[in-house]
Image (cartoon, helix red, strand yellow):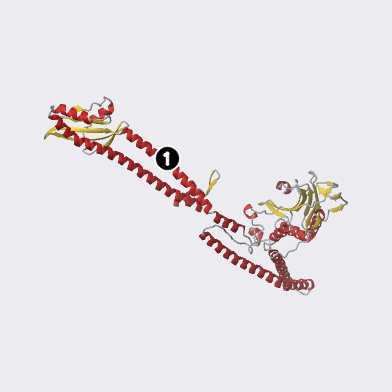
Amino acid sequence: MKFIAKWPKNLKLGRWKLEPSSLQTRLTLGIALFSVLGLGSVALWTSWKMQQLLIVTHKHNIEQIAERFPRDVEMYSETWYVKKSLQKAIDNLTLANVFIWVKNQQGTVIVQSQNFQSDSDHFVLKSLAEMPSKPLVYPINGRYFVFCGGPLTVNGMNVGKLYIALDISRDQKMLVTMVMSLSVASILAIIGVTLAITVYIQRSLIPLRHISQLADNVNADILDRATVSLERAPSEVKELARTLDTMLGRLSDSWEQQRQFVSNVSHELRTPLTIVSGYLQSLLRRGNNLTEIQKEAISIASGEAQRTVELLKDLLELARADSGQIHFHLEAVVLNDLVAEVVEMAKQFSGREIILRFGNGSDFVNLEQIFSDNKNSIITEKSNLVSAQIGNSKKLSLEQNINNNYIASKLSLKSKNIVGKSQYQIDKTINLSLIEVMVDRNRFKQVLLNLIDNAVKYSGEDSPIILNLCQQSGEAIVQVCDKGQGISLSQQAKIFERFYRADEARNRSGGAGLGLSIVKTLVEGMGGTIQVYSKLDRGSIFTVKFSVKQ
């Protein structure tokens, strides 16, 4: 079976998917090969045996004629001369498919059967110089003859040579037809056996596929509840299922011990490290008598202590999520207000340029538009799209009047920029729809702040962070966009895993790789979804979706 390794990995034949490396394919091909060898050998042996029986039967008839012919000639020679006696004996023994002739010592035919014709077959037959003493099959122009020849002695006198030929063409054609029928039947039997074997093996491997599906669906959330139960499975497969159950039990115990350990360590270390961090910060504020080197050392220690405290907080959050102890206080929240509040908070703490956009959903799906290099444009007039840039030189005011789940909001954005020698001011007033969802207000703030913090870490200081808020197809969509280094496609599937860092460039930005994992846990815990779309050296878009409150 080594040749299977050289096959393509997957071949599709209609609805059947052929995987050369699979157990089903190997068993099917192996049994089919043995079936071909077995049935083929039986068919060949049967054909050979039938051929031998046919030849042996006709050989026996020729031998009988050869034994009787001299006796008949001797009997007729008492009345007739030798040549006449030979002809009488030939006429007496000749049948429709039996040909007899006698040659003298000079090789000339002196007598022959009356049924000899002048066609080429009979001419070739009589022209044979040597004939075997034992009967053999000889083909002539598509016809088959069994013949033999030998010296003819009558009353002790050598008359010449006797030749006997038996035309077995009709029987041979019947034999060939039977062999062809047997071959077709063997091929059909092989195909039928192969199909039956394929179906049988496929059904026999169903328990293994069931185990594979169960194992594929096992994750940390259901590890303590995962079991493998099979009915009507072979004893070997049941033994495998029991072994897998035992392994899942051990993994569940180990995972529970690990979670408990992380939770206990995080809880025990958080309080003393918080105290240490507080004392270090207090020492920095009151350390007028400290040297610059001492201040730098204490500042580094304070920063590392604070970073460790934040890491422990993240670990505690994940431990609570794993144990189901995170409780979400879901309430109706107007995202327009909440997102604007988070943007203002993030702007104060990060000191970065953050742009908030409201739209109808179709405006925020194009990377080329979001990552446009036009830095002078503050408002993009496309459908209902509004950009509100939060900064020291800008002023944002919202006057809201709630009426039938809509806000008649006046967004007045005034800005003064110098473009060459001209000065311009933008003042735009439009109506914004109220986007209301059921979320935990504080947890949602945590999600947005984590995403903004992630965008700040992995983008340049001079590039803005863009937040998009829109409603589309009954969903509230919040996008956090940056023009950073981006994430490769192969790493995007792992970006939400715990402690995963995409590459060395992202590793240099600090953090333990827990922020996005916490974001995903919180978003899914509140009934939402999160996706990432990124291009290397262009930036990333993290999209959070929640169902709009009806």
**Residue located farthest toward the bottom when viewing the structure as drawn:** 289
345 left or right, relative to 16: right
441 left or right, relative to 9: right
Residue 223 showing in the rendered view? yes
Residue 108 showing in the rendered view? no
**Residue located farthest toward the left when viewing the structure as drawn:** 156
In the rendered image, residue 536, in percent from the top left (x then y), is placed at 65, 52
Q: Quadrant of residue 453?
A: bottom right
Q: As rendered, which of 253 and 179 lies closer to the eye?
A: 179
Q: As rendered, which of 313 and 189 lies closer to the eye?
A: 189
Q: Where 162 falls versus 282 (above or below)?
A: above
Secondary structure beneath label 1: helix
What residue is shown at x 47% (from left), y 47% (from top)? 194
Q: How many marks?
A: 1
104 left or right, relative to 200: left
In the rendered image, residue 141, in percent from the top left (x then y), is placed at 31, 30
Q: Where 328 falls versus 179 (above or below)?
A: below
Q: Where 315 falls versus 161 (above or below)?
A: below
Residue underneath mark 1: 184
What residue is shown at x 25% (from left), y 37% (from top)? 61
What residue is shown at x 46% (from left), y 44% (from top)? 191
In the rendered image, residue 196, in percent from the top left (x then y), is placed at 49, 47
Q: Residues within 10 Å of mark 1 (few under 14, many from 20)?
A: few
What residue is shown at x 35% (from left), y 45% (from top)? 45
Q: Where 101 falls versus 502 (above or below)?
A: above
Q: Amino acid at mark 1?
A: Val
In the rendered image, residue 4, in percent from the top left (x then y), is placed at 47, 50
